[in-house]
């Protein structure tokens, strides 16, 4: 992240005039000096400084001023007070289909939108095929966008913004639409964009904000309530929502009791003595944009019932097999298969690979031979939704693996959850019990067996 500031706002505010009756507007225009309106401040007194390469999340309830702030940054609204300085080209997805002419075709809207965002005609012509491929709407590109579904609107709008070489990208809730494959493509692009540009991400999904953003800004009734560390700001925001929902602000507490630090240090020391050396693991970047150097191919990946047919729908807790089918195009000396399961935001929920199982004895594969890797496990309980499978094929050692091929956005698992799940995933517990401890209450929970025996003798 650069120290260069690309967005700076000081005391930024936007007000609107509200009239009680339609005729009051005319009276105020005719009877100069008489006031018939009230000022409504949609945003007021906002200070914000964003450096190049930062990712900022903007959170808040509906009507808190988020969209007003973004429109001020984009230049579609003029501020009523304060100062605003923006350096660089901005591409914005403020709302579904914003800026599209419903009577124009998708092709015509691409040209208009890209021109508005600063591309010259020759640049649009050179990038049009890439934009169309990213949108993936096929022959609908030649149809008026008034016939598009919400998902097709989102695809086309995001595709244009992804190809205009923006310095600053603003995304406002548009990722809530679209199918699972499109959402994975968008999140992959956002992760890539964070490495080179400035991103402002607006969402009611605090999990997405925590996953993507370096800092967060919380707006409430047009006022900046908090700005800083993403997790801390989101925690305060969620606490505020709970206070408002239960109307028990005084009784709501963030977090719980902390364990004594001395106990934590003792546990760390014990674990270090049990595992003096960390296990050797396969080192790779799960968010790499590379599709591999070639030399082998992953032909298919998916979930299967143990020894049975493929699965496209699950409820959670099942015994499943994840199979990865591959073909070697050259001799593979030390092949390793890895998989990742991602949610709709592109977050890796869990992953595994074959490296540990075969690190001691390399399993070579001759050229032209097919091979398969099978992972068998209990599927965790997952919230209802669509989940994407990534599969990666490597050859080489753990510290310098060579990515040969990557298969993504080809296999999805639809979960219709039959279990109440909190968080991103929940364990598939085999049983749940609740028992009463017969030991005296004074005994520490981590007491040794000798301590327990001594206390029992004293009790007798």
Image (spheres, rainbow, N blue to C red):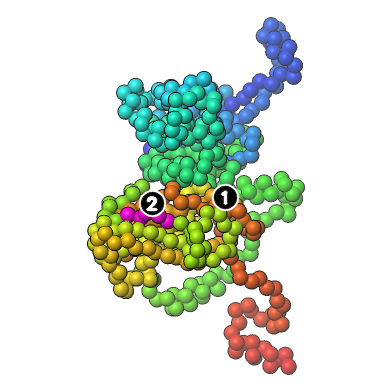
Mark 1 or mark 2: whose residue is earlier in sequence:
1
Pick the residue in front: 401 or 324.
324
The quadrant of the picture occupied by the N terminus is: top left
Q: In this view, does 151 lie to the left or right of 340?
A: right
Span shown in magenta? 297-301
Whether residue 371 is situated above or below residue 436 in the rendered picture: above
Whether residue 95 is situated above or below residue 120 in the rendered picture: below
**Residue at point 70%, 48% (across, down):** 243
**Residue at point 26%, 59% (across, down):** 368
Callout 2: SS? strand
Pick the residue in front: 63 or 250.
63
**Residue at point 44%, 25% (across, down):** 142
Pointer 1: what residue? Answer: 385
Pointer 2: what residue? Answer: 407
**Residue at point 60%, 53% (across, down):** 416
Whether residue 420 is situated above or below residue 136 in the rendered picture: below
Callout 1: SS? strand
**Is residue 52 visible to the viewer in this orientation of the structure?**
no
Quadrant in the picture for residue 272: bottom left
Pick the residue in front: 73 or 400.
400
């Amino acid at each position: 992240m650069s120290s260069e500031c690309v967005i700076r706002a000081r005391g930024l505010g936007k007000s609107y005039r509200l009239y009680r009756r339609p005729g009051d507007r005319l009276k105020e225009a005719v009877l100069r000096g008489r006031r018939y309106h009230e000022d409504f401040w949609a945003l007021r007194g906002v200070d914000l400084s964003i450096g190049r390469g930062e990712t900022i999340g903007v959170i808040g309830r509906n009507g808190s001023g988020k969209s007003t702030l973004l429109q001020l940054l984009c230049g579609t609204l003029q501020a009523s007070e304060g100062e605003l300085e923006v350096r660089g080209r901005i591409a914005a997805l403020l709302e579904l289909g914003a800026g599209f002419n419903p009577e124009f075709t998708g092709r015509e809207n691409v040209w208009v939108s890209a021109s508005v965002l600063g591309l010259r005609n020759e640049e649009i012509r050179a990038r049009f095929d890439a934009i169309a491929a990213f949108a993936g709407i096929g022959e609908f590109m030649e149809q008026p966008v008034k016939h598009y579904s919400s998902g097709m609107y989102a695809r086309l709008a995001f595709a244009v913004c992804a190809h205009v070489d923006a310095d600053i990208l603003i995304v406002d809730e548009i990722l809530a639409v679209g199918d699972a494959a499109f959402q994975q493509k968008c999140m992959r692009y956002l992760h890539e964009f964070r490495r080179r540009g400035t991103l402002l991400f607006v969402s009611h999904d605090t999990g997405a904000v925590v996953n993507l953003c370096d800092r967060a800004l919380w707006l409430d009734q047009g006022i900046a309530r908090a700005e800083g560390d993403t997790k801390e700001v989101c925690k305060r925001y969620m606490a505020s929502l709970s206070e408002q929902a239960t109307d028990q602000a005084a009784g709501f507490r963030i977090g719980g009791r902390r364990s004594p630090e001395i106990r934590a240090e003792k546990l760390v020391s014990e674990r270090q003595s049990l595992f003096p050396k960390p296990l050797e693991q396969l080192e790779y970047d799960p968010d790499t944009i590379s599709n591999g150097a070639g030399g082998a191919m992953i032909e298919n990946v998916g979930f299967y019932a143990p020894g049975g047919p493929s699965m496209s729908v699950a409820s959670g807790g099942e015994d499943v097999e994840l199979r990865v089918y591959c073909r070697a195009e050259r001799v593979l000396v030390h092949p390793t298969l890895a998989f990742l399961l991602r949610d709709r935001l592109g977050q890796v929920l869990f992953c595994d690979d074959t490296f540990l199982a075969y690190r001691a004895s390399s399993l070579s594969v001759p050229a032209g031979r097919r091979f398969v890797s099978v992972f068998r496990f209990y599927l965790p309980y997952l919230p209802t939704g669509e989940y994407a499978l990534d599969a990666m094929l490597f050859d080489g050692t753990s510290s310098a693996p060579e990515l040969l091929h990557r298969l993504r956005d080809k296999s999805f698992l639809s979960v219709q959850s039959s279990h109440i799940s909190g968080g991103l995933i929940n364990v598939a517990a085999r049983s749940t019990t609740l028992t009463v401890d017969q030991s005296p209450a004074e005994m520490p929970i981590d007491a040794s067996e000798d301590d327990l025996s001594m206390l029992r003798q004293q009790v007798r």
